Image (cartoon, helix red, strand yellow):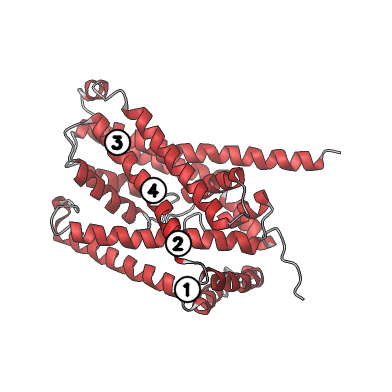
Amino acid sequence: MTAPEPASPPDGLKERFDRQVSSVSILSSIGLSLVVLGVIAALTIQPDTLQQIARMQWWMPFIAAFSVVIRVCFGTWRLQFIGQGRLRWMGAFRAQLAWDFLSNVTPSAIGGGPVAPAYISRDSKVPFGDATAIMLFAMLLDQIWFAFAIVVVLVGSTYIEIIPASLGTVGDVTFSAYFLLFLAWVVLFGYATFVRPTLLTKFIGRIFQLPLLNRFHKAVSATLSRLHKRALILRTQPPHFYVKGFLLTAVIWLSRYALVVIILYGFYTEVDQLLALLRTVAMMLGGLVMPTPGGAGGIEGLYVLMFKPLLPASLLAPTLLLWRILGYYIFIALGAYLAVHQVGRVLVKRTP
């Protein structure tokens, strides 16, 4: 008989989780984004900007906010579905908010997925290995969606100018090479998860043998052992499990893309909506490798590169600000709700 699995994450990973949600990481993420946004505003705002904003479609803020609600609700549904009864609705809801929040205060190249299991385990009293498996499969579904999106962008680029001509041949080749490398990574990640799970565990295990990470090696090794077992369980799921998971993922990401297109169209009805959608897909794929928290700074720059040819210059800053409020700043603010919720639970436990 094996020893019961702990309900909470190993101590080393607790420290890592607490460090990720420090006030310094949050303020640096917001500050960098606001600085770059301020520079963009200073360079693009014109005397007629207020008049342009006044002509905004009145329904746009409501539909844009609704797309955010759809994204969060379907993200919650997906985590609850993957958890197969381990997460209640509110637990899955808080887990989704925690994932979004952590993704905004950690480098985009890392994302909040590897750190979120610590929160899920604490909040919903789910064994850490189960929480890790839930997030692993959710991340895998995202990777499959990215592969689909990359194919759409690459094929679409042969018919539509998705990568702006202003970037020249160098920019076009750079984006294409990045998309192909990303596609290769997705294939490798899926292969290591389903066909050769030992490959993934060995790779991660070697990373945590590095000098700066070796203090986590013991805790990570135990987690990887449990993760290997859960990867084998994922392989036994029926086809409809993966189909439903992918459809939920599609709604989540289409809602993300729709937010940008709704804002652009609400401010400027003459915008090419199909081109705006495809450039949004390319922009978000590019933002996944940003080294800054939540892609702050870099994603704002990509926004200007992608949409400057489609909008009046005076509308770049207002549309960018509204998008970042609804798709970025609001989730950092909701992170405060998560912190207050956790503190409240601790206080209740300590009260006689």
Mark 1 crowd level (few <14, some 14–19, many ≥20, 10 Å Cα): some
Amino acid type indicated by mark 1: Phe
> Which residue bears the numbered disc 1?
194
Cα–Cα span, label 4 and label 3: 15 Å
Amino acid type indicated by mark 3: Ile
Taking 218 as reference, is 98 above or below it?
above
Q: Position of residue 177 (x, y in %)?
A: 25, 66
Residue at 38% from the left image edge and 62% from the top image edge: 144
Mark 2 or mark 4: name the one nearer the start of the chain. 2
> Which residue bears the numbered disc 2?
240
> Which residue bears the numbered disc 4?
251
Mark 3 crowd level (few <14, some 14–19, many ≥20, 10 Å Cα): many
Q: Position of residue 351 (x, y in %)?
A: 82, 38
Amino acid type indicated by mark 4: Val
Circle 2/circle 4 CB separation < 8 Å: no
Q: Nearer the viewer, mark 3 or mark 2?
A: 2
Taking 263 as reference, is 76 above or below it?
below
Q: Nearer the viewer, mark 2 or mark 4?
A: 2
Mark 1 or mark 3: name the one nearer the start of the chain. 1
Cα–Cα span, label 1 and label 3: 37 Å
Residue 262 bears which disc, if any? 3
